[in-house]
Image (cartoon, rainbow, N blue to C red):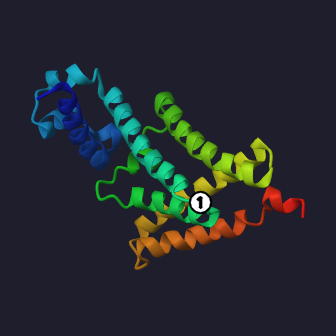
């Protein structure tokens, strides 16, 4: 198997084990067995369990960011942007694999390398949203970032809550409700071109 394919195969096996057991209870032996390789082969690709876990966090981060990038670029209509972005979070947590747990429910969140990656995810998501808010409203970078972090938090926490309750609200409807909350708040800040009127 080519190195890149083997790495992807190992990451998939590790993803299943880490999602099922968390970092501390996951064992490299189990990951190797699940991948159908020997432990030495696993260690050829990843020097240790932490490096393997960090590679998965990076993969999960990229997956979520790609969804958010697509949502923000999908329209110039800010109400639709809010809906699309909230929906991206709901889609991410609704994946049957439970991959979101590595980002939002990590049992290793206090490890400096993990914390740095999780903080970077919030920073990157917020920066993109903040840039749009600042451009439209004329608010300062700091003010726009605070609002953006609030919107990211609303999307993330409500998506996780919706998934955990396994209620009867369909995903699209749940995302729309949360997006309405976010939109009703953010639209209260007048657009720059309207301030001169």
Q: Residues within 10 Å of mark 1 (few under 14, many from 20)?
A: some
Task: Tell me where residue 161 appears, x and y as whole percent.
Answer: 48, 64
Task: Tell me where residue 125 appears, x and y as whole percent.
Answer: 56, 46
Q: Residue at x 51, y 35 (%)?
A: 115
Q: Residue at x 11, y 29 (%)?
A: 1
Task: Tell me where residue 191 appears, x and y as whole percent.
Answer: 78, 60
Decide: is 178 above or below 58: below
Residue beneath label 1, please?
154
Q: Quadrant of the C terminus?
A: bottom right
Q: Quarter of the image holding residue 165? A: bottom left
Residue 106 in sight: no
Decide: is 170 above or below 145: below
- Which is more toward the observer, 138 or 148? 138
Task: Tell me where residue 183 appears, x and y as whole percent.
Answer: 65, 67
Q: Say left or right for 45 vs 194.
A: left
Residue 24 in sight: yes
- Which is more toward the observer, 18 or 140? 140
Decide: is 165 above or below 44: below
Mark 1 secondary-structure assignment: helix
Q: Residue at x 51, y 29 (%)?
A: 112
Q: Residue at x 63, y 43 (%)?
A: 127
């Amino acid at each position: 198997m080519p190195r890149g394919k083997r790495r992807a195969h190992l990451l998939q096996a590790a993803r299943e084990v880490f999602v099922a057991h968390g970092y501390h209870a996951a064992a490299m032996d189990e990951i190797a067995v699940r991948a159908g390789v020997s432990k030495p082969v696993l260690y050829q690709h990843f020097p240790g369990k932490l490096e393997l876990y960090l590679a998965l966090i990076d993969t999960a981060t990229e997956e979520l960011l790609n969804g958010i990038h697509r949502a923000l670029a999908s329209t110039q209509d800010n109400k639709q942007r809010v809906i699309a972005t909230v929906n991206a979070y709901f889609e991410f947590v609704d994946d049957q694999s439970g991959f979101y747990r590595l980002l939002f429910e990590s049992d290793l969140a206090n490890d400096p390398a993990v914390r740095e990656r999780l903080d970077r995810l919030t920073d990157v998501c917020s920066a993109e949203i903040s840039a749009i808010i600042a451009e439209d409203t004329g608010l300062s970078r700091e003010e726009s970032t605070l609002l953006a972090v609030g919107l990211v938090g609303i999307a993330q926490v409500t998506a996780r809550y919706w998934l955990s309750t396994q209620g009867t609200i369909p995903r699209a409807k749940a995302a729309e409700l949360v997006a309405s909350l976010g939109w009703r708040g953010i639209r209260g800040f007048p657009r720059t071109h309207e301030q001169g009127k």
